[in-house]
Amino acid sequence: MKKHWFQIVLGMVTGFAATLAFYYQVSENRYIQYKLEDKVIENSYRAEKLQMELEKFLNKKIAEAPQKLEGASLNEKFSKLESKITAIEQQTIGLRQAINPSKPEEILTIARLTDEVNLIRKDISNLDNKLSNQQKGFQESVLREIKSSSDSTTLILIVIVPLVLNFLYTVWKDIKAEKK
C-alpha cells in the first residue's frame, strides 16, 4: 500500500514538473520574442554604425586618391553617377536621331554607350540585392540559433527532472532502509 501511495505521489510530482517545464517553454517563447526584438534593434544600430564607419573609410580613401574627388561624399557621387547615366542616355537618344545611317561606326559607338549605361545600372541593382540578401540571411541565422538553444534547453529540462526525482527517491529509499 505504501509503495502505491509513494508511486502516486512520485507520478504527481513528475506530472507537476512536466507541467512546469511546459509552462517554462511557453513563457520562454515570449521572452525569446522580446530578446529577438532587442537584437533586431541592436543589429540595426550596429548596421548603421558600420555603415557610418564604412562611409568614413570610403571618404578617407577618396580623399587620398589622386583624382579631384576630395570634397564629394558617397551619396553625392551616386547622384552624380545617376545624373551622368541619364545625361548619357539623353545624348545617345539625340545621337540616334541625328545619326546618318550610312556611317556604321557611329551606330556602333552609340550601341556601345547604351550597353555601358545598362551595365552600370545592373551593377548598382546587383549591389543593392546582395546587401539585402546578406541582411536577411543574418536575421534567419539568428532566429535559427535562438530556436535551437530554446529547444535544447527544454529537452534537457524534461530529461533532467525525472532523473533527479528518481535519484531523490533512491536516496530516500536507502535512508529509510538504513533506519530499519
Image: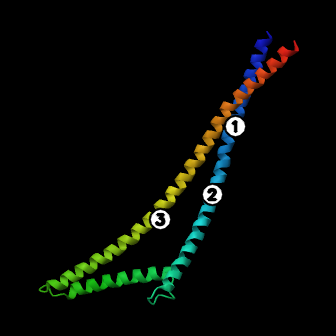
Helix, strand or loop under label 2: helix
Q: Mark 1, mark 2: which one is toward the viewer? A: 2
Residue 143: image x %, image y %? 56, 50
Label 1 packing within 10 angstroms: few (<14), some (14-19), many (20+): few
Three-letter residue code for mark 3: Leu
> What's the residue at 63%, 35% (across, down)?
155
Looking at the image, the residue that sits furthest to the right is 179
Residue farthest along the front direction in this orientation:
178
- The amino acid marked with disc number 1 is Tyr
Q: Callout 3: 10 Å neighbours few (<14), some, many (20+)?
A: few
Residue 89 numbered mark, or none: none
Of residues 159 and 16, the one drawn nearer to the viewer in this rendering: 159
- Which residue does the numbered mark 1 point to in the structure image? 23
Report helix, strand or loop for mark 1. Answer: helix
Residues tagged 2 and 3 counted as in contact (Cβ below 8 A)? no
Left or right of 164 in this view: 151: left
Q: Residue at horizontal 54%, vertical 56%?
A: 139
Mark 1 and mark 2 lie on one chain; the one further toward the N terminus is 1
Instruction: Tell me the residue that label 2 is attached to.
Output: 39
Q: Where residue 109 sits in the image (x, y, percent)?
A: 22, 83
Q: CA distance from mark 1 to mark 2?
A: 24 Å
Which marked residue is nearer to the observer: mark 3 or mark 1? 3
Name the residue carrying label 3.
131
- Pick the quarter of the image with the N terminus: top right
